Image (cartoon, coloured by chain):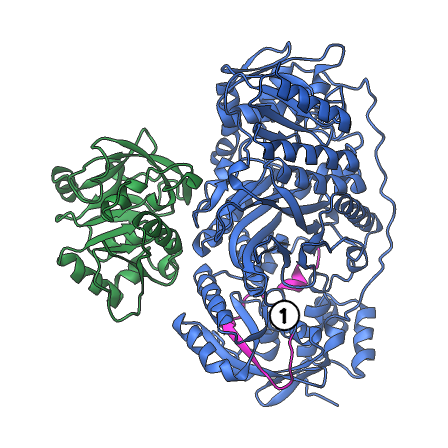
């Protein structure tokens, strides 16, 4: 399985993501600069976290309108798996690849802490390495992770099993509706989530709960 | 030589530039004519306290700054220390006190930005940050606003830039009501053979401007930071810079890419006094002149004058001297990152600092006198009056359990979670110990086992009572906190925050504190490799507590062997290592007295440096042998608070026995120095622990068994047991309750 990590200026968890993909997949992912002509032929495209374009205007809004995102959109339409984490999730939403909006945390503050996630659905490649209903640990680090969608969209997400992760055990750090932490597109080949599974993949991180996500994507044992 | 000048230089204008009459006379003598307005601005920028260290230089020279691992001591953008395997840690701490009080968010944000720039200017990628914050009394009307703004500003910049905040300090005291302190620390990793310096070399080489455009923000910031505050503080807001972490992140990546091309001869970030200071330093250090053409400087506002351009403190800018043949390559790197790149001048052989603007020369000054030969003062100082030691029978009484709960849930000893959860503490994926323990620990990228530990410490109460002992204690506590994780303390950076040095009693504090720091650093082989001095932290004639913050860095050969403060398992023996047989004896200047009885009397505790070193070396060896399951140094609140913190952190209780015939309040709340608590995975009756005690005895170190971990309560001798749940609730509640009130 081949992976590519897209880098926009201002992203800063690209190195964390590259490290996770390399450590779990055994090979380094291709690193694609936003101005590169094309994305290499890969099975997985990852947009990592950070502050693309300084989060100016709205988180993810500027990166979402770059020509690179047209290429990501084309690949997604052709079935390539796309993972967006944190700012990557915000970019996917701003680009229209995922529905809803990510608003400022209800605390109005940046929050970096560990939360609990329930793996809500496992009938997709991203969460297939977990058991349905499994509770995992995962860190978050964001200022704008408060997920919102209108009633109709929410009903579709819930009804079609497109909520991948939910904040569990009263650990919702941002006020997200229905405790939503991560969602899938209708075809279930695009996942966006606010938490950082790439920061919980080895003993040095104090846990390996994030491994199964990457292992499933990269066809490796967790 | 005459230069045209459109603005008359009046005594008032000179005074407004923070220059004293005798300093102005010195300028006249030096250049033999009246300076132009731009030149006056340049002198003011270079000769202010902030940039010239004119009051402190004489005393800073007494500090130990060398050692077998020191690659670069003070005088560069940051200190550089060898950590083996061809790697070096590059670090410094710097204040942004004045701007953070005027405009807390931007003041703090640009403080973080400035220190990060200092580190990557040397060729190091930042890997850890800390900050030491001091605010006025919690009940003061401005305090909440300042805490909100400063914490958000630190987080806003550091999180976006992408460096983990691994440790820090937050403290409240009424003496900071009119001047809060924001001391920001950053550390980076570099290869020892790829360190970059600010000393320019070679005549006729291009001086290149990189990064963000120059605006009118922060004009006169360094001069503002070299004066006291009065009632006109609101008028000073325009002197505060505005930070753009997005540009800084791009500047970091662009600089590291550029350095890898081999194009860089010298590099200096534009910090305080911007273009002026960076150009003068590069030239003066290299014994070269510099000629700048301001018409080439990228500007973001129209009609900027030479004066404004030379004094702007717009952020995220760099000045470099480049190999001319590599200029196209360098330009391509900066174009990729969409940053400005402009050749704005050249090095010359005439030791003059010449500034051209709109085809005219607006400044022509001797560069050495501006820079490394700036004025220096031997300011008068008086010996601080040390308060009498507390009488041994002066122990105000309170129930031990009640006192413990109050201290653990008070503003001094409560959890700082509300603060550090606003900082990204785990980005880069190398954070081994995050805030909340004795020191932050990260693993070193590119190495299997190596780790680095970071801590920042000072006890301003002690420094106020006894500046010499307080200075010693700040270094000792820093060294102790590093040791408590198992790290070998390598070197430190000092951030000296004091009041107005023109007052002999303030100067006395500085002189004695620096003396104490120097003695402690020598005794502990813990050299000072970088630092910063912030004076004039005064409002309407009232100075802050003397606050010489010490930021320390330690090395762990194997991060897996580092230990934390939380109890890890039940039924483990607890040893109190170091100090005296009576456990606690010293209540002078303690938190117990200050926060429970509103008393600020007695002498500060004294640090026995020989015992400090012996005890620390013993504890570190124990940790590295693998028998220690948790370790915590004793500081504010003494044994009682340290035990409570270990219980809270581990979610596990303990039972500790009193010693008979000695006031339990002294035992539990005395702030005697040089002590650690350790828990061991050893049988308290076994041969191994007996051997450990034999060794301690032979070294003359107290290491008594004082109790056992386990249960849901913390039981301090005969005191009423306190549940760990109650301690945790008190500990975690103070900050969020305060901030939401």
- The N terminus of chain B appears in which quarter of the rendering? bottom right
Q: Tell me which chain the residue with mark 1 is part of.
A: B
Which chain is tinted blue?
Answer: B
Q: Nearer the viewer, residue B87 or B352?
A: B87
Q: Residues within 10 Å of mark 1 (few under 14, many from 20)?
A: many
**Number of residue marks:** 1
Residue drawn at the location 21% of the way across and 64% of the way down: A71
Q: Nearer the viewer, residue B186 or B170?
A: B186
Q: Quadrant of residue A12?
A: bottom left
Disc 1 target residue: B198
For the residue labelled by badge 1, is the local secondary structure a helix, a strand or a loop? Answer: loop
Left/right of residue A149 with respect to residue B123 in the rendered view: left
Q: Residue furthest front?
A: B687
Residue depicted at 37% across the width and 59% down the height: A56
Left or right, A121 with reference to B9: left
Q: Is residue B66 left or right of residue B220?
A: right
Q: Position of residue B623 (x, y in %)?
A: 60, 33
Q: Is residue B408 visible?
A: yes
Identify the main secondary structure in magenta: loop
Q: Quadrant of residue B50?
A: bottom right
- The spot of residue B370 in percent (x, y) is 73, 73
In-front residue for pair A193/B556: B556
Q: Is residue B697 magenta?
A: no
Seen at 42% across and 40% down, the residue is A205
Picture colour for chain A: green
Residue B720: image location, x then y, percent: 59, 10
Image coordinates for residue B94, horizontal then vertical, percent:
63, 55
Can residue B201 be found in the magenta stretch? yes
Against B233, residue A170 (above or below) is: above
Is B482 drawn above or below residue B326 in the view shown? above
Q: Which residues are magenta?
A: B200-228
């Amino acid at each position: 399985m081949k992976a590519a990590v897209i880098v926009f200026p201002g992203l800063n968890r690209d190195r964390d993501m590259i490290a996770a993909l390399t450590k779990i997949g055994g090979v380094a992912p291709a690193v694609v600069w936003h101005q590169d002509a094309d994305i290499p032929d890969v099975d997985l495209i990852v947009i990592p976290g950070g502050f693309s374009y300084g989060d100016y205007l709205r988180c993810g809004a500027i990166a979402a309108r770059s020509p690179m995102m047209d290429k990501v959109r084309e690949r997604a339409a052709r079935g390539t798996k796309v993972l967006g984490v944190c700012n990557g999730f915000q970019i996917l939403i701003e680009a229209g690849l995922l529905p809803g909006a990510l608003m400022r945390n209800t605390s109005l503050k940046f929050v970096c802490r560990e939360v609990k996630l329930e793996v809500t659905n496992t009938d997709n490649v991203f969460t297939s390495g977990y058991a349905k209903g499994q509770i995992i640990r995962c860190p978050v680090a964001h200022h704008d992770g408060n997920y919102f969608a209108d009633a109709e969209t929410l009903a579709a997400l819930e009804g079609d099993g497109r909520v991948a992760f939910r904040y569990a055990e009263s650990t919702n750090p941002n006020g997200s509706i229905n405790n939503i932490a991560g969602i899938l597109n209708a075809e279930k080949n695009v996942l966006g989530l606010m938490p950082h599974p790439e920061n919980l993949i080895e003993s040095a991180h104090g846990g390996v709960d994030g491994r199964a996500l990457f292992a499933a994507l990269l066809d490796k044992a967790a | 030589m005459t230069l045209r000048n459109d603005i008359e230089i009046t005594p008032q204008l000179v005074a407004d530039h923070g220059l004293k009459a005798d300093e102005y006379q010195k300028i006249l003598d030096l250049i033999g004519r009246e300076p132009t307005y731009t030149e006056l601005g340049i002198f003011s920028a270079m000769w202010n306290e902030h940039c010239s260290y004119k009051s402190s230089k004489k005393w800073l020279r007494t500090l130990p700054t060398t050692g077998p691992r020191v690659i670069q001591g003070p005088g560069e953008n940051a200190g550089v220390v060898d950590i083996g395997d061809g790697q070096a840690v590059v670090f410094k701490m710097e204040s942004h006190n004045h701007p953070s009080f005027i405009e807390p968010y931007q003041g703090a944000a640009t403080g973080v930005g400035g220190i990060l720039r200092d580190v990557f200017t040397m060729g190091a990628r930042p890997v850890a940050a800390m900050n030491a914050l001091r605010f006025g009394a919690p009940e003061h009307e401005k305090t909440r606003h300042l805490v909100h703004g400063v914490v958000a500003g630190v987080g806003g910049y550091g999180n976006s830039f992408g460096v983990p905040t691994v440790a820090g300090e937050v403290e409240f005291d009424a003496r900071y009501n009119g001047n809060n302190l924001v001391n920001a620390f950053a550390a980076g990793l570099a290869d020892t053979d790829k360190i970059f310096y600010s000393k320019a070399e070679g005549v006729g080489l291009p001086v290149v401007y990189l990064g963000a455009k120059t605006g009118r923000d922060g004009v006169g910031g360094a001069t503002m930071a070299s004066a006291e505050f009065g009632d006109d503080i609101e008028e000073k807001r325009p002197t505060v810079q505005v930070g753009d972490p997005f540009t800084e992140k791009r500047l970091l990546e662009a600089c590291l890419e550029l350095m890898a091309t081999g194009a860089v001869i010298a590099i200096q970030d534009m910090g305080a006094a911007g273009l002026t200071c960076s150009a003068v330093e590069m030239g003066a250090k290299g014994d070269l002149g510099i000629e700048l053409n301001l018409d080439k400087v990228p500007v973001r506002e129209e009609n900027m004058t030479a004066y404004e351009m030379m004094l702007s403190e717009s952020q995220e800018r760099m000045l470099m001297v480049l190999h001319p043949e590599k200029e196209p390559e360098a330009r391509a790197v900066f174009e990729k990152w969409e940053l400005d790149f402009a050749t704005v001048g050249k090095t010359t052989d005439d030791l003059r600092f010449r500034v051209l603007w709109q085809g005219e020369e607006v400044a022509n000054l001797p560069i050495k006198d501006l820079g490394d030969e700036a004025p220096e003062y031997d300011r008068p100082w008086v010996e601080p009056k040390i308060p009498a030691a507390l009488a041994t029978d002066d122990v105000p009484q309170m129930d031990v359990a009640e006192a413990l709960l109050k201290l653990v849930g008070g503003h001094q000893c409560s959890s700082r979670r509300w603060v550090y959860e606003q900082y990204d503490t785990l980005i880069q994926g190398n954070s081994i110990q995050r805030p909340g323990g004795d020191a932050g620990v990260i693993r070193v990228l590119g190495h299997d086992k190596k780790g680095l530990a970071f801590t920042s410490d000072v006890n301003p109460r002690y420094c106020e009572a006894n500046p010499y002992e307080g200075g010693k204690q700040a270094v000792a506590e820093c060294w102790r906190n590093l040791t408590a994780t198992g790290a070998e303390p390598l070197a430190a950076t000092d951030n000296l925050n004091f009041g107005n040095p023109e007052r002999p009693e303030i100067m006395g504090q500085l002189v004695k504190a620096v003396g104490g720091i120097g003695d402690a650093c020598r005794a502990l082989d813990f050299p000072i490799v970088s630092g910063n001095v912030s004076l004039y932290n005064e409002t309407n004639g009232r100075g802050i507590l003397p606050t010489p913050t010490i930021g320390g860095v330690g090395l762990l050969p194997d991060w897996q062997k580092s230990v934390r403060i939380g109890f890890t398992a039940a039924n483990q023996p607890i040893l109190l290592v170091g100090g005296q047989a009576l456990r606690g004896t010293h209540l002078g200047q303690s938190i117990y007295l200050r926060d429970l009885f509103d008393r600020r009397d007695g002498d500060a505790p004294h640090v026995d440096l020989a015992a400090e070193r012996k005890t620390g070396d013993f504890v570190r060896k124990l940790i590295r042998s693998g028998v220690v399951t948790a370790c915590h140094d004793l500081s504010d609140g003494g044994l009682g608070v340290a035990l409570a913190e270990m219980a809270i952190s581990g979610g596990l209780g303990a039972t500790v026995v009193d010693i008979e015939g000695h006031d339990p309040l002294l035992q539990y709340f005395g702030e005697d120095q040089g002590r650690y608590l350790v828990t061991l995975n050893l049988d308290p009756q076994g041969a191994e622990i007996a051997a450990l005690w034999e060794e301690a005895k032979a070294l003359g170190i107290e290491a008594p068994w004082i109790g056992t971990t386990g249960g849901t309560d913390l039981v301090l001798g005969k005191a009423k047991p306190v549940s760990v749940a109650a301690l945790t609730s008190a500990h975690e509640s103070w900050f969020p309750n305060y901030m939401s009130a």
